[in-house]
Image (cartoon, grey):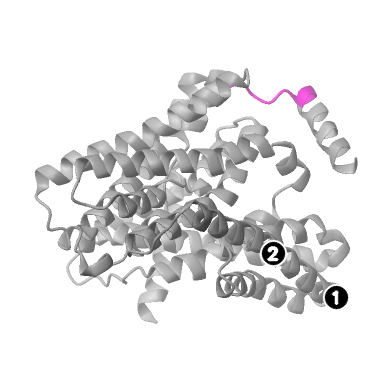
């Protein structure tokens, strides 16, 4: 308990310092965690994948979905799906085949599982910077929409690849069934959750009960989805989008005001704890690494380069075909910082493969950690300067009003 209180105090202090000196708090929290990891006697909690995937990710996705404009999300659905589905698949396959080529003794399936782990960006830092440096609202909306869906895509690929690595036969029909169950089941469970919890919100006007119901919602939905082998991420996002779109008809103004303040606090603490814990894992990750360092460095450079290049290539190709400014492509490409889901998925890799076959699991965990460090700290620190260098177009107030009118017209159609 003392450790938890201490970590929360560090999160609050570091976040306040970051705001004062103009740095992004997730970046500074990771850096502080890296330093504390090597302080003798400092308690370093072990980061459990279940803690991230069940305890942290659902509420963060839920509040992000609730705050998302459904008309704007639908209006930008094509670029969002290209990034959240197409780019994640492209990155997972590229990284997976690259690692398999460099480590031919490791089965391709587990390499693809690792590729899926490092594929989804964590848009918390990216969107925070994007808002602060004044990127066009459409770019911010697309980055936020990407972050709502990309984890689901990556985790489905991860699940299929791990099953194959454990020796189960996985054919095209099996993959199609898994994807259909994960995505379709997640949507249905998410809609059912929106109906159930929307009904509960409508039955009470007490802000205390509304906040309590809201806190339960993401955990109940994700647990129900995972129990039925559907995607908990998809279910939580669908529930959040459906409820957020109807908040004014479900709750009183007092409830909405209190709930907004409550979820801002929850989001602040959860995000802060996750980024601090990410930094604290460095000592343990290095201690468990047994692969020769020349091999480690070669793979680290190759994987990081692949992660960066795939995003640049994919985004530039699609922005060019869509006849959008290439400066938008540059900023969107550089806003691909990885975070907690990447490390959680890497930690969830099996300890051995089918027949007890060993593989360098600790090396994959290190590679995931290195990708997080380079993208989160390197890109997170340099994104504002990079945006000033490429000079993406600012929002035109007239065009913004026209775009909003178009979105509202499509929503009412």
Residue to which mark 2 is pinned: 190
Q: Residue at x 63, y 69 (%)?
A: 218
Say which quadrant the C terminus sits in: top right
Residue 351 visible in rendering? no
Q: Secondary structure at mark 2?
A: helix
State the image quarter where residue 382 is shown.
top left
Is 386 contained in the magenta span? Answer: no
Say which quadrant the N terminus sits in: bottom left
Q: Is residue 186 left or right of residue 403?
A: left
User: Relative to 130, is 157 above or below?
Assistant: below
Q: Indicate which disc residue 80 carries.
A: none
Is 397 contained in the magenta span? Answer: yes
Residue to which mark 1 is pinned: 205
Mark 2 → mark 1, Cα distance in angstroms: 23 Å
Residue 135 visible in rendering? yes
Look at the image and give the residue range highlighted in magenta.
392-399
How many marks the image carries: the answer is 2
Nearest the viewer among 209 and 229 is: 229
State the image quarter where residue 377 is shown.
top left
């Amino acid at each position: 308990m003392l450790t938890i209180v201490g970590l929360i105090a560090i999160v609050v202090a570091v976040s306040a310092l970051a705001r004062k000196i103009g740095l992004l708090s997730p970046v500074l929290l990771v850096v502080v965690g890296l330093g504390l990891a090597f302080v003798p006697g400092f308690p370093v909690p072990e980061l459990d994948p279940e803690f991230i995937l069940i305890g942290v990710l659902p509420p963060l996705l839920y509040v992000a979905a609730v705050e998302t404009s459904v008309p704007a999300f639908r209006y930008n659905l094509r670029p969002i799906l290209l990034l959240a589905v197409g780019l994640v698949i492209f990155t997972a396959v590229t990284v997976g085949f690259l690692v398999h080529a460099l480590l031919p003794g490791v089965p391709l399936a587990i390499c693809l599982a690792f590729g899926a782990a490092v594929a989804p960006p964590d848009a918390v830092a990216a969107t925070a910077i994007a808002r602060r440096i004044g990127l066009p609202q459409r770019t911010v909306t697309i980055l936020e929409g990407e972050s709502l869906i990309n984890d689901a895509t990556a985790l489905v690929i991860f699940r299929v690849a791990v099953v194959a690595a454990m020796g189960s036969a996985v054919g095209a029909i099996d993959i199609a069934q898994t994807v259909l169950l994960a995505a379709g089941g997640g949507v249905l469970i998410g809609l059912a959750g929106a109906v159930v919890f929307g009904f509960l919100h409508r039955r009470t006007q007490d802000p205390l009960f509304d906040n309590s119901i809201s806190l339960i919602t993401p955990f109940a939905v994700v647990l129900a989805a995972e129990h039925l082998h559907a995607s908990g991420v998809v279910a939580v996002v669908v529930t959040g989008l459906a409820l957020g779109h109807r908040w004014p008809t479900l709750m009183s103004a007092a409830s909405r005001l209190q709930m907004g303040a409550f979820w801002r606090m929850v989001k602040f603490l959860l995000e802060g704890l996750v980024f601090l814990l990410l930094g604290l894992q460095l000592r343990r990750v290095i201690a468990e690494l047994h692969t020769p360092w020349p091999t480690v460095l070669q793979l680290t450079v190759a994987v990081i380069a692949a992660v960066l290049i795939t995003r640049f290539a994919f985004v530039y190709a699609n922005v060019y075909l869509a006849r959008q400014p290439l400066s938008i492509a540059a900023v969107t490409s550089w806003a691909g910082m990885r975070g907690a889901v990447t490390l959680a998925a890497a930690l969830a890799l099996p300890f051995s493969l089918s027949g007890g076959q060993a593989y360098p699991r600790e090396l994959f965990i290190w590679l995931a950690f290195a990708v997080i460090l380079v993208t989160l700290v390197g890109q997170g620190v340099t994104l504002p300067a990079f945006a000033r260098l490429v000079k993406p177009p600012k929002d035109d107030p007239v065009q913004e009003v026209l775009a909003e009118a178009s979105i509202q017209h499509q929503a009412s159609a």
